[in-house]
Amino acid sequence: MGLGLIGKKLGMSQIFDEHGNIIPVTVIKAGPCTVVQKKTTIKEGYNALQIGFEEIVKVQRVNKPLSGHFKKASVAPTTVLKEFRVTEEDIDANEVGAVHSVEMFEPGDYVDVVGTSKGKGFAGVMKRHNFGGAPASHGAHEYFRHGGSIGQNMTPGRVMKGKKMPGHMGARRVTVQNLKVIDVRGDTNVILIEGAVPGPTTGYVVIKKAVKKQK
């Protein structure tokens, strides 16, 4: 719950604090984000603000439904649209077309960052679930990276749901909580966040005030 910003991960770097300690930071271009639509309890059944990020240069490539959506709001088409559940006070305080910048955060704040993790394709149990593998001795062969038994006999006679097995790894929504904002640079719309955030360089992320930890 609460309004946040959409951003693009530019990569990682490091800065020095006043004591000379190195702090690893993720550099994110966050905002400016434009309010494209307001959703209210009366009309849609819930309160939310839809915001857009990264203006599309070649507007002729925007399809007609989205083009009409942006035209109704009288805002420029954007690459990314995200919806944020908010309170009625936030609905009243924001009008369609309002712009939010990185300056809604300040150094020392704690934030939650949501992104899509890097896709690793089809992975085995050792890479995907950190299995130890089979014993590699006494004539064992062709079984070193297998997962072993996956179920029981007659009872229950099936593989239990959630069993750790090989499969698609990565490329999923990941939230990293309680990351500290180290610096906010409003002139370039850049925010420096301590530590790593999910996703590759140039990947889109959502930054919101931390729900578990405050300044």
Image (cartoon, rainbow, N blue to C red):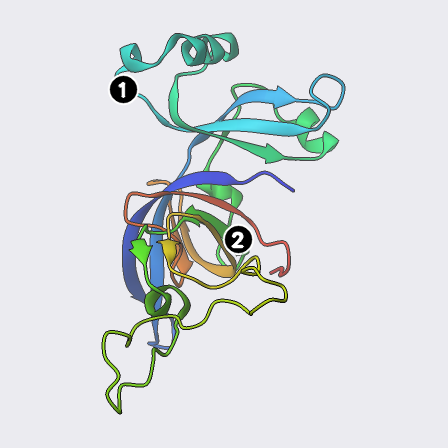
Outermost residue, front direction? Answer: 154
Image quarter hosting the C terminus: bottom right
Q: Secondary structure at mark 2?
A: strand
Hey, what amino acid is under mark 1? Answer: Val
Q: Is residue 46 left or right of residue 113?
A: right
Residue 138 percent across, percent down from the top left: 26, 92
Compared with 109, 154 (above or below) is below
Callout 2 amino acid = Asp
Q: Earlier in the sequence, mark 2 or mark 1?
A: 1
Q: Position of residue 172 (x, y in %)?
A: 43, 48
Residue appearing at x 64%, y 59% in the figure: 212
Q: Residue at x 31, y 53 (%)?
A: 122
In screen coordinates, is 118 left or right of 160? left
Q: Secondary structure at mark 1?
A: loop
Q: Quadrant of residue 186?
A: top left
Residue 198 vs residue 136: left or right? right
Q: Which residue is mark 2?
A: 112
In the rendered image, the quadrant that contains the N terminus is: top right
Going by the image, does 14 lie left or right of 45? Answer: left
Q: According to the image, label 1 marks what residue?
A: 57
Q: Residue furthest bottom?
A: 138
In the image, what residue occupies the spot 37% across and 53% down? Answer: 170
The quadrant holding residue 204 is top left
Give the percent coordinates (x, y) of residue 95: 60, 21
The location of residue 116, given as percent across then percent down, is 40, 47
